[in-house]
């Protein structure tokens, strides 16, 4: 039986919750088709998050790894296309680290592309009524750090695992404390992730549809 590794983050930036973990933890030990999901929480900490993720990959040898994080201000589930080899923190992580213009992997490639079928995943979510988009930037905070570390690790392995990253909007209870911040209900995020995982497991060749951006 296949294993899917699904990760979310602990709260950061003064928040009491993180929608990525609030949703991801519901998937632990869930069967999706011929796969079983292992859900784990990562620290919102440079370095430590990737070390923990690498240990999980080595332990479980999952066929699919999807990391999930919060992107406050976004209104849709964002399936990330690319991770870049740079840490450039606007705020400190949960250990007070605030790297500026530092490579994630010294001598590593400038960027890695997600190896999951990002456009097919987005289209499947949209077809089910879940607001979703392809995102061209995972930022330069711990989310991008984890996505780059994930794809770097998979590039070193030879058993065909695929990986990617999905950003979620705020939950409504978070947005209620902020002016004009978009949000998405937890059950909609859950439905979207379920669809995204199933699509990634079932789709070998990505959809050839336009998902580009003008800026």
Image: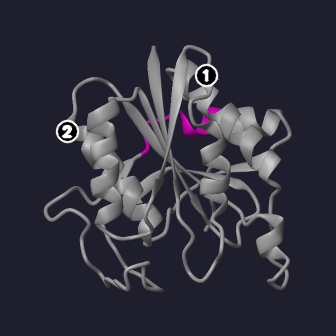
Q: Quadrant of residue 30?
A: top right
User: Which residues fall within the magenta stretch?
Assistant: 114-121
What residue occupies the far left of the structure in this picture? 107
Q: In the rendered image, is residue 84 in sight?
A: no
From this view, report whether residue 169 is shown above or below residue 210: below
- Separation (CA) of disc 2 from disc 1: 28 Å
Residue shown at 13%/61% (left/top)? 107
Mark 2 = which residue? 156
Residue shown at 35%/55% (left/top)? 148
Q: Which mark is residue 115?
A: none
Q: Which mark is residue 31?
A: 1
SS label for mark 2: helix
For residue 183, side relative to residue 86 (left or right): right
Pair 2/1: label in front:
1
Residue shown at 49%/69% (left/top)? 139
Residue shown at 32%/29% (left/top)? 61
For residue 29, side relative to residue 17 (left or right): left
Q: Position of residue 96 (x, y in %)?
A: 38, 86
Q: Position of residue 206 (x, y in %)?
A: 54, 29
**Is residue 115 found inside the magenta-colored segment of the image?**
yes
Compare residues 177 and 71 and report the one nearer the observer: 177
Q: Position of residue 102 (x, y in %)?
A: 25, 77
**Is residue 144 found inside the magenta-colored segment of the image?**
no
- Quarter of the image where the N terminus is located: top left
């Amino acid at each position: 039986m296949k294993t899917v590794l699904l990760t979310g983050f602990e709260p950061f930036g003064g928040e009491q919750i993180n929608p990525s973990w609030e949703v991801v933890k519901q998937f632990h030990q869930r069967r999706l088709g011929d796969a079983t999901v292992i859900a784990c929480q990562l620290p919102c900490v440079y370095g430590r998050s990737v070390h923990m993720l690498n240990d999980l990959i080595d332990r479980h040898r999952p066929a699919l790894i999807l990391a999930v994080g919060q992107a406050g201000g976004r209104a849709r589930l964002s399936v990330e296309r690319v991770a870049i080899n740079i840490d450039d923190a606007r705020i400190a992580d949960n250990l007070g680290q605030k790297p500026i213009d530092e490579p994630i992997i010294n001598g590593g490639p400038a960027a890695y592309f997600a190896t999951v079928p990002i456009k097919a995943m987005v289209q499947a979510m949209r077809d089910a009524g879940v607001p979703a988009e392809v995102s061209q930037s995972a930022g330069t905070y711990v989310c991008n750090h984890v996505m780059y570390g994930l794809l770097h690790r998979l590039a070193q392995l030879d058993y065909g695992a695929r990986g990617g990253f999905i950003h979620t909007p705020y939950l409504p209870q978070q947005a209620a404390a902020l002016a004009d911040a978009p949000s998405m209900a937890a059950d909609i995020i859950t439905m979207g992730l379920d669809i995204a995982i199933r699509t990634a497991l079932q789709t070998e060749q990505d959809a050839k549809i336009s998902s580009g951006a003008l800026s």
